[in-house]
Amino acid sequence: MSNPKKTPKDYTLADLQQIAHHYEVSATFADGMKEPDDAAKFRGVAKRARAEITRRMEDAMKVFAGPPNQD
């Protein structure tokens, strides 16, 4: 039995925050260990997690802001 691959939408905002933080810390550690390729991969994961958080927050702001004012 295989597990389906998760997409960013399968995670809560709290999960995404934890993922981003974990991978940022891992990237810093990889820098210290002189592993620039690993650090770049970790930073990429953190960047994608932060981008998903930002996208969701922007979508939420559109919902709560309502339609633009027609003056």
Image: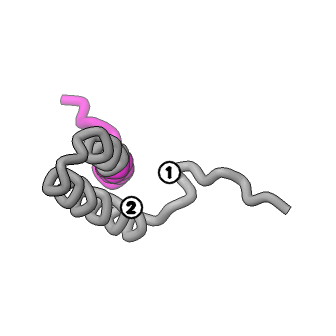
Q: Residue at x 34, y 42 (%)?
A: 41
The residue indicated by pointer 2 is: 16
Image quarter (top left, top right, bottom left or bottom right) of the N terminus? bottom right
Residue 55 in view in this figure: no
Q: Residue furthest top?
A: 71
Disc 2 vs disc 1: Cβ atoms closer than 8 Å?
A: yes
Amino acid type, callout 1: Pro
What is the image's colouring? one colour
What whole-number distance in Å separates the C-alpha atoms at marks 2 and 1?
Answer: 8 Å
Q: Residue at x 37, y 62 (%)?
A: 19
Circle 1 sits in a helix, a strand or a loop, which is it?
helix
Q: Quick one: SS at disc 2?
A: helix
Residue 33 is situated, as x and y percent measured from the top left of the image, at 19, 55
Percent position of residue 35, x then y: 24, 46
Q: Is residue 37 above or below residue 28?
A: above
- Crowding at dot 1, Cα within 10 Å, few <14 / some 14-19 / many 20+, comes out as few
Q: Position of residue 70 (x, y in %)?
A: 25, 30
Which mark, by number, is residue 70? none
- Please state the extent of the stretch shown in magenta in the rendering: 49-71
Q: Main secondary structure of the magenta part?
A: helix
Query: 7 or 24: nearer the eye?
Result: 24
Give left or right: position of 71 versus 44. left
| Left or right, 62 with reference to 35 | right
Q: Which residue is mark 1?
A: 8
List x then y, in percent, for residue 29. Answer: 20, 60
In the image, residue 2 sits, relative to residue 55, either above or below, namely below
Mark 2 vs 1, N-terminal side: 1
In this rendering, the answer to whether 4 lies above or below 70 is: below
Q: Is residue 56 visible?
A: yes
For residue 17: magenta? no
Few, some or many residues within 10 Å of mark 2 (<14, 14–19, 20+): many
Q: Residue furthest left?
A: 32
